[in-house]
Image (cartoon, rainbow, N blue to C red):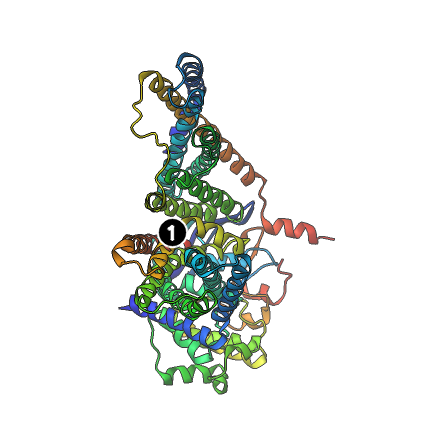
Amino acid sequence: MVAIRGLHISKSYGHYRILEDLSFEIAAGECYALFGPNGAGKTTLLRILATLHRPSAGRLEILGRDAIQEREVVREALLLLAHGSHLYDELNAVENLSFAMALRAASPTDREVKVALDQVGIGAFAELKVRYFSAGMKKRLAMAKAILAHPKVLLLDEPYTSLDETGMVIMNRYIQALLKEGASVVMATHDRIKSAEVADRAGVLTHGVLRPLTREDLKTCDLF
Amino acid sequence: MIFFNVIRVVAWKDLLCEMRSRETISSMFFFALIVILVFSFSFSMDQQAARELIAGILWVAFAFTGIIGLGKSFSAELQNDCLEYLQMSPAPKGAIYLGKVAANLLFIVTAEVILFPMFVIFFNLDVVEDLPVLLLIFFLATLGLSTVGTLFSAMTVQIRAREVMLPILLLPLAVPVMIAAVEATRGALNGNPLALYRHWIELLVVFDVVFTVVSFWVVELILDS
Amino acid sequence: MLNTIIRKLQRYKGWFGAAGGLCLGLGLYYGLVASPPDYYQGEVVRIMYVHVPLAHTSLLAYTVLFLGSLWYLWTRDPVVDNLCHAAAGLSVFFTAVALITGSIWAKPTWNTWWTWDARLVSFAVLFLILAGYLMLRTFIDDPEREARYAAVLAIVGFIDLPIVHFSVEWWRTLHQPLSISMRGVSISKEILIPLVLMGIGFSILFVYMLIVRTQMLYLSSLLNAKKGRLLSQVHLAKVEP
């Protein structure tokens, strides 16, 4: 089953064209790793997939629904973990999670929250204000948010940056568990080694064009 | 059901953040205090002149104080890109907007209620019997400022020069609120019978209803893509 | 759809210009030469032949802006946005000239440059809203977002204007009634002819300017699109040794 289908998607921003005529399909239960030099439009593509931007032209279907016309429905199945952690500094970890879940009309039990926090290894800081969190801890908390949200489509923008070794292992373990449930994962990353552990397919975005890569390419050739 | 839950959660989140940081209320309070001081230096007033001018001074101070609070309402969401999460969450944008309006209304009215006694002291006013009417006027006028102001706060936070653009866009549109608030407040402070300034309160109600509906209707175009 | 309408219209835009110019010329002749001076106001009344039509045209322009904004939000057609942008620019121009001519007329008639009359204040607020509208447009980089936000502002402002008018009217009647009002002065034929001619002339001129300006904005957006390059190419070009 195809989870995400993009047809001739392009995006201009002011004077600049960021993406030009991209077409792609990502299946359910598949993990797609997106590479590309800085400024290639990886984040823009993820933001389009997350329904944060409208494509200037083209059509985007997520889980068989039009991502522009039916975005309220699509959004219930989507989650983007972006550069910003989407956390409020004045709230503690648990409050942040329950606020984020309330907006998704989900109400996890205290126990589920605790399990999620333990799973990402910050169970001890449940009552600490996010103001005092380090970047890696914020990343872990964002991961806990994804664990509670059970998204059908998870979009990750540089999932490994600012995570320590254990953090990366937890991230990959979580991605694999999610894939087993039949969800799709799209990640924009520069970390070939870590992403190769989970990615089924990969592509390079250069000059606004998406070029497919094999698993062997990932390990050997010069990508750009 | 989910709709009202989102309103409640957004308002509660703003309230909780504010109770912990006290950023908005304290900056509004001290700013308004300075406005009061500047005004009392600028006009040397006897009690008669004060009665004439006080309503205007009060609402100039409240309007600019309100703009500080309204601006902070959405610029606080820029921290850690929280606005992005609000935008891509499946929650109805209208509910997020109403939650924000409720929080802003609460903050600004609180600041006004704290500030009003200062005005009474600095300008030697005596207002005891008309206090409920005054509170009603404060509430209605602040609601008017908050509905339009929250909409423009959501808009200006996503553009360049946001601190400048909020008052530039908000104040011309808020002319009816300012006129009605000043006139009604003057009536109440002078101890006039309610019938003499009731139409101003009605105008405030009309403005509030019209712009709550309109803003609620268009806010999706601002917060969504 | 608008594209074809505008394309058809712009072919004949010269006729609009000519018709507008003709009406204005005739109107000016009647207003400045053929009609007698007013009994009360004297020669000063002739400013009215410019002022009143200008004020009406600025409202016409804002109405076009309002309808265009609704239309844009419905279709999301960038050309409609160009139309709105053009209408806003013209409206702010007409409003400014109407305010200035009104002020010049008010000095000899009411013996003051400015009075807090409901119409005057409404026009001042209109001017401020439109100035804010044009400022807002310059502060947004993404053309799609710029169009969307601008349309929202135009709609909210349009709904606000009648409320502003009523509130100022109530406010003024409370304090002091206007010393001189146009009400009760019967409008004679000598005054009506130039007024109507100038009104029609300015309206046609507005349509002409609207077509030209929309075309101009549309072409400049095409030019920008042509100028635009892929960001990644620009970036790579800088990095290469």
- Identify the residue shown where x is 51% and y is 77%: A130
Q: Is residue A7 above or below residue A131?
A: above
Relative side of C139 to B97, left or right: right
Amino acid type at image mark 1: Ile
Q: Nearer the viewer, residue C18 or A96?
A: C18
Q: Nearer the viewer, residue A98 or B117?
A: B117
Q: Nearer the viewer, residue A139 or B11?
A: B11
The answer to whether residue A76 is seen in the rendering is: yes
Q: Residue furthest bottom?
A: A124
Q: Position of residue C69 (x, y in %)?
A: 38, 42
The answer to whether residue A5 is seen in the rendering is: no
Would you name the residue on which mark 1 appears?
B179
- For label 1, the SS is helix
Mark 1, chain letter? B
Within-10-Å neighbours for mark 1: few <14, some 14–19, many 20+: many
Q: Position of residue A35 (x, y in %)?
A: 56, 61
Q: Residue furthest right?
A: C241
Relative side of C160 to C94, left or right: left
